């Protein structure tokens, strides 16, 4: 019987995989609440952006919610159909479209933010305020470091 030895040249752990695992671990607490309200992860990300910033230009929604243009078009169409958002053209530049949450969308943001903030409070209590702050700081530094110049 032979034991296969790893011949991989990798020295470091798989950071992208670890980040995905961390995302999935955190989202496991959020998804049940989203599903109760028939929201996808992408729809929640859009509502979260709108909840933080109010009316937002479509390109900014795409960037902040990390949704590619073609996918965003479908997500926004479903959200508009479900009366979660409304779209409007910029009166000064008809090429620009703004998105804002409807009253229904705002109620969902308010309701879900309580659940999500409770989970963050639990994380802070479990990790400690300093460690959670360090995690945020390290992630911000990593994102800035990896941004194209």
Image (spheres, helix red, strand yellow):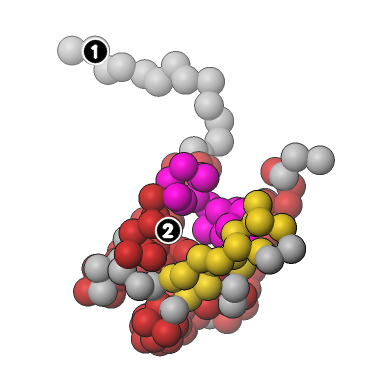
- Secondary structure under tag 1 reads loop
Residue 113 visible in the picture: no
Q: Determine which quarter of the picture holds residue 37.
A: bottom left
Image quadrant of residue 40?
A: bottom left
Q: Earlier in the sequence, mark 2 or mark 1?
A: 1
Stretch of the chain drawn in magenta: 57-73
Badge 2: how crowded within 10 Å, few (<14), some, or many (20+)?
A: many
Judging by the rendered image, the residue that carries numbered circle 2 is 76
Q: Is residue 57 visible?
A: yes
As displayed, is residue 128 above or below residue 32? Answer: below
Q: Could you tell me which secondary element the residue under label 2 belongs to?
A: helix
Between 100 and 88, the one nearer to me in the picture: 88
Compared to residue 70, the image places residue 135 above or below, namely: below
Q: Residue at x 38, y 57 (%)?
A: 77
Question: Percent position (x, y) of residue 89?
Answer: 60, 63
Of residue 46 and residue 88, the one placed in the foreground of this image is: 88
Position in image of residue 21 (x %, y %)? 39, 51
The residue labelled by disc 1 is: 2
Q: Is residue 39 left or right of residue 7?
A: left
Which residue is nearer to you in this view: 27 or 131?
Answer: 27
């Amino acid at each position: 019987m032979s034991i296969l030895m790893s011949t991989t040249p990798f020295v470091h752990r798989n950071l992208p995989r670890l980040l995905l695992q961390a995302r999935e671990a955190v989202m496991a607490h959020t998804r049940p609440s989203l599903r109760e309200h028939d929201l996808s992860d992408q729809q929640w990300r859009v509502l979260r952006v709108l909840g933080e910033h109010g009316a937002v230009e479509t390109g900014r929604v795409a960037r902040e919610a990390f949704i590619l243009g073609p996918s965003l078009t479908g997500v926004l169409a479903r959200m508009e159909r479900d009366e979660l958002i409304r779209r409007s053209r910029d009166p000064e530049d008809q090429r620009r479209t703004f998105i804002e949450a409807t009253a229904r969308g705002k109620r969902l943001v308010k309701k879900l933010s309580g659940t999500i903030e409770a989970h963050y409070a639990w994380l802070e209590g479990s990790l400690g305020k300093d460690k959670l702050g360090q995690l945020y700081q390290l992630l911000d530094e990593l994102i800035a470091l990896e941004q194209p110049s």
